[in-house]
Amino acid sequence: GRGAGGAMPGSQEQPEKSGGMLGKGLTGWMKSTAASLEGHVKEMKQNTKLIMAEVSENVDLDKAREAGKRLTEKLSKASKTEERFEVTFEKGGLGLELDLQKNATVKKVVDGGQAERLGICLQDRLVAIAGEPVPVTEDDGEFVEAMKARLSKMGRPVALTFARIG
């Protein structure tokens, strides 16, 4: 038989009333916690809208689009394989013209000149002079001036390193 409380002697069962109270308390706590979380989510959404409004007021969208475009172009170029090679120029003219507005890209190779004999092609890009990397800058004017200074000081023979997208 069962004892006076309805539970088997020695069992760990709680009387029904106590279990019911525990269930109601847990349910209430869960409802309260869910409501609290719901309030936090709502507040986070409102804060996000405020931040977005503030950012959109302070961001020059044209500049952001242009920066994104430049980054996309750079990533596109970077995803292609780039072969680097070094050639040594002797005394005399190089037999090439560089477009300093386009990162020292070869824009002309003179027929019969040193560059042609050394295998330089249009669109090859000068990346180093005598083992020293060409300057890297976002300012085209600064790049042009730095490159002119480097090229004018270049003696002969000189090793130039080019990159070719292939």
Image (cartoon, rainbow, N blue to C red):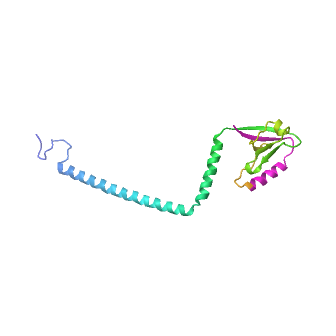
Pick the front one: 127 or 60: 60
Specify whether residue 152 is painted magenta.
yes
Q: Is residue 132 visible?
A: no
In the rendered image, residue 131, in percent from the top left (x then y), is placed at 78, 42
| Residue depicted at 43% across the width and 61% down the height | 46
| Residue depicted at 86% across the width and 45% down the height | 155
The magenta-colored residue range is 141-166
Pick the front one: 28 or 47: 47
Left or right side of 10 for 63 = right
In the rendered image, residue 127, in percent from the top left (x then y), is placed at 75, 44
Q: Is residue 45 visible?
A: yes
- Name of the residue lying farthest toward the front: 111
In the rendered image, residue 132, in percent from the top left (x then y), is placed at 77, 45
Left or right side of 2 for 68 = right
Q: Residue 34 lies in what quarter of the image?
A: bottom left
Image quarter of the N terminus: top left
Pick the front one: 9 or 55: 55
Q: Residue 86 lies in what quarter of the image?
A: top right
In the rendered image, residue 43, in percent from the top left (x then y), is placed at 41, 60
Image quarter of the C terminus: top right
Left or right side of 83 for 91 = right
Specify whether residue 150 is painted magenta.
yes
| Residue depicted at 62% across the width and 54% down the height | 66
| Residue depicted at 30% across the width and 55% down the height | 31
How many numbered dots are placed on residues in this image?
0
Above or below residue 7? Residue 38 is below
